[in-house]
Image (cartoon, rainbow, N blue to C red):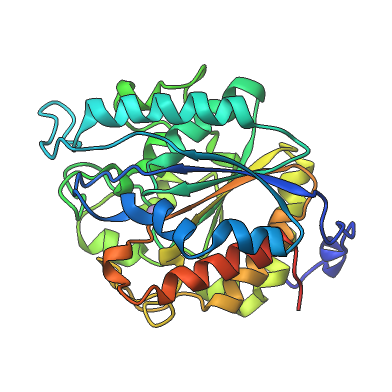
Amino acid sequence: MDRGRSIFKSRHAPERPYRAVALMGAPVESEARAEGVNLAPRALRTAGLVAALETAHLGVEDHGDLEIAITDARRDPATGIIGLEQLRAASEEIYHAVASQLDEHRPLLVLGGCCSVLLGIAAALQRFYERFGLAFVDGHYDTYDPATSPTGGALADMELGVLTGRGPDALARLGTRHPLVETRDVWVLGARDRWEMLAAGAPDPHVDLADAHHVDDSGVRRHGPARVGAHAARALAHDPGRFWVHVDLDVLSNHAFPGVDFPLPGGLDWDELRRLLVPLVTAPGFLGMDVTIYDPTLDPERISARRIVGLLTEVLAGVRR
Ligand SMILES: [Mn+2]
């Protein structure tokens, strides 16, 4: 990536290109646990998210939390996916809520929940845009198939596969077109489980996502998170021109963000994640972001909750250091 330094020349996106954000919670928990990542929106609000954003001079249009729940822990016999019908219904709810709040002048922040929130979000983006980009910031590729899913069928292991066209029709055809997102419009930033997937007999994500753009966690660190974020932002702002940012917090190292279900070596620290995200969030064409996989039951002192609030505030306020 060092060749052609000129590609990193910035258009100098304004430090804060907008004054307000819209906020909604989407408490989907695709393992169908009664208490897990579905508790995140409430915990982040309790940790002071809205006040922190307002203190950073960002107005908050708070649309509350969607009343969605995945309670059916059975695997759908045909697809092997846990709670398939409830997931489909929850994704429809997310689709309608996101579609009604998309605004190019005021980004949307969606609090997950697990990574399944992306299906409804992508369907909503598809309604308005012929094509849209996806900066997929995640410790995992999330392209398992149901047979190799380490959770035994949770959609959060598979959603990028479904988004790019390899899932059951009930989910993969939520939008107006198939696939929900074109693989070439996806930037996979920070993933680090390719070898775990291959060892588990799962499909090779570099084959499934051959047309996507890839910078794994060591690549992000080697090239510098701010440069990688700026490069991806510029590419996405140029083509397809509008884009969404997905942040699965398991892109952080297990040291920075303890208490995840599936520990993996490697990963970013909080400051690296902030520097990766700021150029994306302040770029032209940024429409919104989701933040997923925070499980308050694994964070009794709410240490991670306060860090997430700090991260989201600094990123959305465009804080550069
Ligand atoms: Mn994920």
Q: Which quadrant holds the C terminus? A: bottom right
Residue sitting at x 20%, y 41%: 146
Please provide percent x and percent y for residue 247: 51, 56
Q: Nearer the viewer, residue 315 or 136?
A: 315
The answer to whether residue 118 is above or below residue 98 is below
Q: Which quadrant holds the N terminus? A: bottom right
Q: Nearer the viewer, residue 237 or 61?
A: 61
Residue sitting at x 21%, y 50%: 149
Whether residue 181 sits left or right of residue 153 in the image: it is right
Please provide percent x and percent y for residue 182: 55, 34
Residue sitting at x 63%, y 70%: 274
Q: Nearer the viewer, residue 288 or 36?
A: 36
The answer to whether residue 251 is above or below residue 167 is below
| Residue 220: quadrant of the picture | bottom right
Asked if one can make out residue 141 in the rendered structure from this viewpoint, the answer is no
| Residue 165: quadrant of the picture | top left
| Residue 230: quadrant of the picture | bottom right
> Most extreme residue toward the bottom, as rendered?
255
Whether residue 81 sits left or right of residue 136 in the image: it is left
The answer to whether residue 121 is above or below residue 246 is above
The answer to whether residue 159 is above or below residue 221 is above
Please provide percent x and percent y for residue 293: 37, 57
Residue sitting at x 36%, y 77%: 254
Q: Which quadrant contains ligand 1?
A: bottom left
Asked if one can make out residue 273 in the rendered structure from this viewpoint, the answer is yes
